């Protein structure tokens, strides 16, 4: 049995991403919001969507006013790093991001993924690329003959765990790429 210890992904760890935050406007304390209005709150390590619970909602900070705002969870870019298994980051193309993890990382768990392939690249500031693996997420389960190979819809694995990241003398960064139209969560 191997245990992969969770690591909090913060603004300093996530250095690049090609996924947008969300389509909602950022909260403005001087705007009057109607019932059901959706906004985002962005700040240091704060990437949340909120829904207005009342009409005439003005000047109520969503992070401090649960009677006025409902926390709807992480923004699209950050859903893949929350602890919920039912939320997924979505993008119409590949999802690419870079994590710079202080210290050493020897494992990575990618959970609740929908996509055809995952590529993990680990780099070291001295040695360059020290790890590069592409994992095919298509499942062979249910393919028992030519008929099922040719005519059954493809199935995909939703999870993959890599436990053999090489040790490196300096902190590695990992870039995760999912190939094809995807909806992903990690």
Image (cartoon, helix red, strand yellow):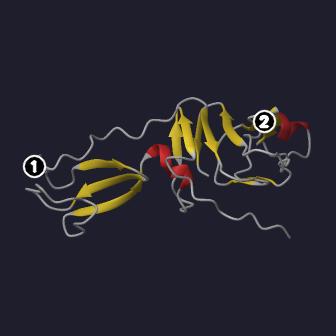
Q: Residue at x 21, y 59 (%)?
A: 61
Q: Are marks 2 and 1 in contact (CB under 8 Å)?
A: no
Q: Residues within 10 Å of mark 1 (few under 14, many from 20)?
A: few
Q: Residue at x 82, y 33 (%)?
A: 127
On the image, which quarter does residue 156 sit in? top right
Residue 134 percent across, percent down from the top left: 80, 36
Q: Regarding mark 2 in the picture, which secondary structure is present there? A: helix
Gap in angstroms between the C-alphas marked 2 and 1:
54 Å
Q: Residues within 10 Å of mark 2 (few under 14, many from 20)?
A: few
Tag of residue 32: 1
Residue 74 percent across, percent down from the top left: 43, 53
Query: Residue 74 vs residue 184: left or right?
Result: left
Q: How many marks?
A: 2
Q: Regarding mark 1 in the picture, which secondary structure is present there? A: loop
Tag of residue 151: 2
Residue 101 percent across, percent down from the top left: 65, 49
- Of circles 2 and 1, which is in front? 1
Query: Residue 94 vs residue 136: left or right?
Result: left
In-front residue for pair 74/11: 11
- Name the image quarter holding the N terminus: bottom right
Position of 148 relative to 32 (above/below): above
Residue 183 percent across, percent down from the top left: 57, 42
Mark closer to the chain start, 2 or 1? 1
Q: Residue at x 82, y 45 (%)?
A: 168
Query: Residue 140 vs residue 9: left or right?
Result: right
């Amino acid at each position: 049995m191997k245990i992969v210890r969770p690591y909090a992904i913060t603004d300093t760890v996530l250095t690049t991403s090609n996924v947008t935050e969300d389509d909602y406007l950022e909260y403005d304390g001087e705007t009057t919001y109607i019932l059901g209005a959706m906004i985002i709150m962005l700040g240091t390590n704060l990437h949340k969507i909120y829904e207005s619970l009342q009409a005439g909602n003005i000047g109520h900070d969503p992070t401090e006013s649960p009677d006025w705002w409902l926390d709807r969870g992480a923004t699209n870019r950050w859903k893949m790093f929350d602890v919920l298994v039912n939320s997924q980051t979505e993008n119409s193309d590949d999802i690419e991001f870079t994590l710079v993890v202080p210290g050493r990382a020897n494992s990575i768990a990618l959970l609740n993924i929908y996509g055809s392939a995952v590529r993990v690249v680990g780099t070291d500031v001295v040695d360059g690329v020290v790890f590069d693996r592409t994992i095919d997420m298509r499942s062979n389960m249910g393919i028992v003959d030519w008929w099922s190979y040719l005519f059954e819809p493809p199935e995909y694995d939703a999870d993959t765990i890599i436990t053999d990241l090489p040790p490196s003398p300096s902190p590695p960064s990992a870039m995760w790429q999912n190939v094809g139209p995807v909806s992903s969560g990690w």
